[in-house]
Amino acid sequence: MLLKKIKIVLLITSIILVQIIIGVGLSTAVKSYLYQDKIIPGTTISGVPVGGLSSEEALTVLKNHFPQPTADSTLLLSDNIGSNWKIKYGEIKFNYNYQEAVNAAVKVGSGNHSFWHIENFYAIIKNNENIILNVEIYQSYLKKVLKDIADTYNTQPQNAKIAYLENKVVLLPETVGKQVDIAATIQNIMLLPAGKHQAELVVKNIIPSLTSADLKDINILIGRYDTIFDSEKKARTHNITIASEKINNLLIKPGAEFSFNQTIGARLSERGFKKATIIIDQGLAQGYGGGICQVSSTLFNAVFIAGLPVLERHTHTILVNYAPVGKDAAIANDVKDFRFKNDGQKAIFIASHIEKNRLIVKVFGHYQDAESIEHKTETVRQVIKPETVYKIDKNLRAGEVKIINPGKDGYDIKTYEITIINGMLVERKQVAHQHIEPEDALIMLPPQQAGAK
């Protein structure tokens, strides 16, 4: 009985298997007959239906739907702020790759002839298969066009700065730089949907190294020092200018240390430094970077006034004429350095610039880090004595004198606002000037006394 049941099950299974094989065979035969040399239904190229078409027919449909741009027609590039550029297709050798797309469409479902793949064949018909119409571009041409755009479009970032105007710290905000991302822009153009002729110019923002957020706690001048140099000494002036620029707009965070040698770098001709007089032992010589010790000394005095702890400083072996005795800071390659530390709770900011033959270094910080700040008004009054003028009066008798005008003193009055930080004068600024001319005294004399006078 059991054997009989097994035979019946095997028979039924065989019948079903034969039906499946016949069905698959018929389906494959129908597919091969209906779609030989044709693209299977449900296939599109960039959204354009090409199912049931031959290669030649699909190629014609595609070219009609997406005509090849002429050499003089243009691709529009736009950035995110509304600026536009037009690129002629002829300049970049733009070309739709129609044949590649059609060949890919013909291959859709071509491997689905077996039992296991016939299901995929019908899934393609039901769900559609879209082939992307790619483009060919001479990228070297496109790179050149985009580089020409970038040369005029790119801007360098500008750091935020501190200005000191009318005894107030003013924050000058940063400027974000812009740079065309050529590779990403090319990628945008290559992936542009067929029939579209506008692409994005990809631009990267370049954030400056110093922003308004970095300087938000800078609100007071805590140290300033000026020194004078001989601007006729061109090489020395050149070196001072380089060193001044390197310490300008420098932010030193709380707890950070400053090194003059690290900030300025090696004094070499290839880094722009020139030969000028330097001090070696007890004598003078010529060396690259001569003059930068005046910058380190000026900075030292400004830092000293600001009350910042000095970690390393060396005096010159002979006296210098730009700083008080014992108040200089000698620099010598890696042997001698000037270093200090910001021991405050807030950042400090160094500003350095040159006005004619004057080097000015300022140290800015926060109110809570200044030990003592005092603002005063000072008035300087200078008396200008009048002249005495004598004239002859014929009506006067001998020995008689007549005073017409006794005269009046004049004055030159200047008013200054001064800032004293940590017991030292940081700034003395003239805010008013009044000049009053004296009135000359006029005395009349008789003729007899004229000669005597």
Image (cartoon, rainbow, N blue to C red):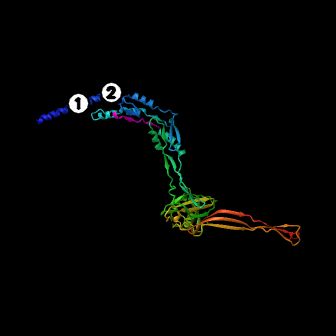
Furthest toward the bottom, the residue is 399
Q: Quadrant of residue 122?
A: top left
Q: Which residues are magenta?
A: 126-137
Q: Is residue 179 above or below residue 385?
A: above
Mark 2 or 1, nearer chain start: 1
User: In the shown orientation, is residue 438 left or right of residue 143?
Assistant: right
Between tags 2 and 1, which lies in front?
Answer: 1
Number of numbered discs visible in the structure rendering: 2
Q: Secondary structure at mark 2?
A: helix
Q: Give the residue number, with chain letter if any, for mark 2.
A: 34
Residue at 19% of width from left, 32% of height from top? 14
Q: Residues within 10 Å of mark 2 (few under 14, many from 20)?
A: few
97 is within the stretch colored magenta: no
Q: Nearer the viewer, residue 116 or 425?
A: 425
Badge 2 amino acid: Leu
Badge 1 amino acid: Gln
User: In the shown orientation, is residue 128 left or right of residue 405?
Assistant: left
Asked if disc 2 and disc 1 are in contact, CB closer than 8 Å, the reply is: no
Q: Is residue 448 above or below residue 160?
A: below
**Does residue 30 appear in the picture of this structure?**
yes
Q: Residues within 10 Å of mark 1 (few under 14, many from 20)?
A: few
Q: Quadrant of residue 187?
A: top left
Q: Give the residue number, with chain letter if any, for mark 1.
A: 19
User: In the shown orientation, is residue 4 left or right of residue 45?
Assistant: left
The C terminus is located in which quarter? bottom right
Q: How far across and how far down the image is residue 55, in percent?
A: 39, 29
Residue at 53% of width from left, 45% of height from top? 153
Q: How far across and how far down the image is residue 164, in percent?
A: 58, 59
